[in-house]
Amino acid sequence: MIEKHLMRTRARHSITPEEESAIHALVREVREVPARTTLIHAGERIHHSTMLLDGLMCRYKDLKDGQRQIAELHVPGDFVDLHSFSLKRLDHNIMALTPCRVALVPHDRLQALTENHPHLTRIYWFSTNLDAAIHREWELSLGRRDAVSRLAHLLCELHSRLALVGMADDAGYRLKLTQSDLAECLGLTPVHINRSLRQLREAGLVTFRSSKVELHDMAGLRGVAEFDPAFLYLEPVEV
Amino acid sequence: MIEKHLMRTRARHSITPEEESAIHALVREVREVPARTTLIHAGERIHHSTMLLDGLMCRYKDLKDGQRQIAELHVPGDFVDLHSFSLKRLDHNIMALTPCRVALVPHDRLQALTENHPHLTRIYWFSTNLDAAIHREWELSLGRRDAVSRLAHLLCELHSRLALVGMADDAGYRLKLTQSDLAECLGLTPVHINRSLRQLREAGLVTFRSSKVELHDMAGLRGVAEFDPAFLYLEPVEV
DNA sequence: CGTCTCATTGAAACTCCTCAAAGGGCGTGG
DNA sequence: CCACGCCCTTTGAGGAGTTTCAATGAGACG
């Protein structure tokens, strides 16, 4: 059930069978979430964290005039709001972009984890630090990359993250996002996303159509994006 | 010596005298860092974390063409790279923007902390989650706010963070940054920062000149910025 | 007092946005 | 099973915000 979460965890850290059962024991219940549901609203008191089992979710903030900025996309296996364990309230909203299946992890079980499992605590601390690293890479994109490069970078990032949980290969991956969703990730308008996608397509690098990303020239795409996967910390680390 | 760090910690969490001594015991040495020194380079193996005692530091990333994006500014009392404890290598560089005094905290002492002090561990986990919250707010700025609002927001953020460690009051604060530094924080050019500063000044909101931020109309500034300090988690939380 | 960096200003160019409209795909209901 | 409606995608034209290039001014430091 939480297999993808274990995949992404094992990819970066070595965990004992006993620790795996401790992770299994974190989950209290599994729930289905319809697409376009805002699961958690900024500011509300939270008592459990959410692990994404299937589907795509995001963290987003918006301005009074309705403009929205997605701060991070979440793929299956991700802990979407592990940080709510220490923050108690979030500074952002959490929404399901597609129909999702999530596992709920009560904060008191995480509390117990920090008391009894220092190694797993460090692993989960690492996990929130990885989210921060993704935020930083997005800051670089939003601040300094132009539209085409920004888009290329996001498609590379998703490729790496989905591949880690077996949901992408060299040919491409399924991505049930609209061009408006991409716009909200990249600080652009849907219209400009459309034009930028065309540029990438006409350059023979990648096609995004009917919810599928087809990679035609991964090296070229990474070149345009100046993509270096180091920020995803894909190498095993002993924490 | 680490008084500002204790100030910002006490502002958000209650800690016992015994925990305070544990924090004191983290520091191995204090070091001076000249302005414009890159202390830590992306990718290198790190064995200690850096606590900022005095001066301003930043985390930054850059692109091949030399464009730079600052991902976060650090004020005295901040742990600049606490996340290097779990990540081991950083995805970004760390630079002193002004002459700085820093305290070095060996990772093995943090490791011991996670084994013996779960409460302090949660407090420091919180601290890295707070950095992530600041990153998210910057993503919102970079993606969706226009130049003037972005600048106003940063000046509000720094006011709140500096006030927390007693380095800002209602009148303003000292800020030893150049307009180019601000440009690198905000994803703009120095020229445009200059024009935007003029707009804020002529609107009677704030003046930034000779390293001083003078707040003339805090309410107005917050309005322009759409500034809500919630993302700084200034309220006490029991973790 | 000269030098260097930082700040300031103007004019032109460019990227991306806004507004608008038409074209496609898919599910639902008649 | 087709038609309708709805949302998403695509394209065009004009406009706004920001950048680039260039030059001058001001302040700090040796």
Image: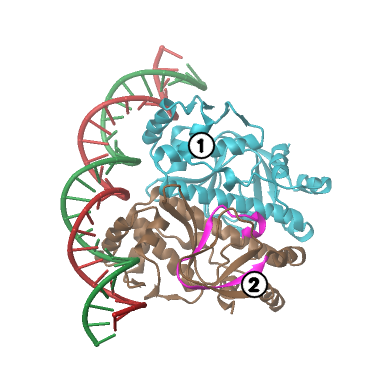
Chain colours: A brown, B cyan, C red, D green
Mark 1 = which residue?
B222
The amino acid sitting under disc 2 is Ser
The amino acid sitting under disc 1 is Arg
* Residue B41 in sight in this render: no
Q: Look at the image and tell me in which quarter the N terminus of chain B lies.
A: top right
Q: Which mark is residue A14?
A: 2
Are discs 1 and 2 less than 8 Å apart at CB?
Answer: no
Label 1 – label 2 distance at C-alpha = 47 Å
Who is closer to the viewer here, B105 or A81?
A81
Q: Secondary structure at mark 1?
A: helix
Name the spot of residue A76 as percent of width and height, x first: 52, 72
Q: Secondary structure at mark 2?
A: loop
**Label 1: few (<14), some (14–19) or many (≥20) C-alpha neighbours in 10 Å:** some
Say how many tags the image has. 2
Q: Which residues are magenta?
A: A83-106
Q: Residue at x 55, y 57 (%)?
A: A41
User: What is the chain identity of the residue bearing mark 2?
Assistant: A
Name the spot of residue B47 as percent of width and height, x first: 65, 54
Q: Look at the image and tell me in which quarter the C terminus of chain B lies.
A: bottom right
* Residue A38 in sight in this render: yes
Q: Quadrant of residue B112?
A: bottom right
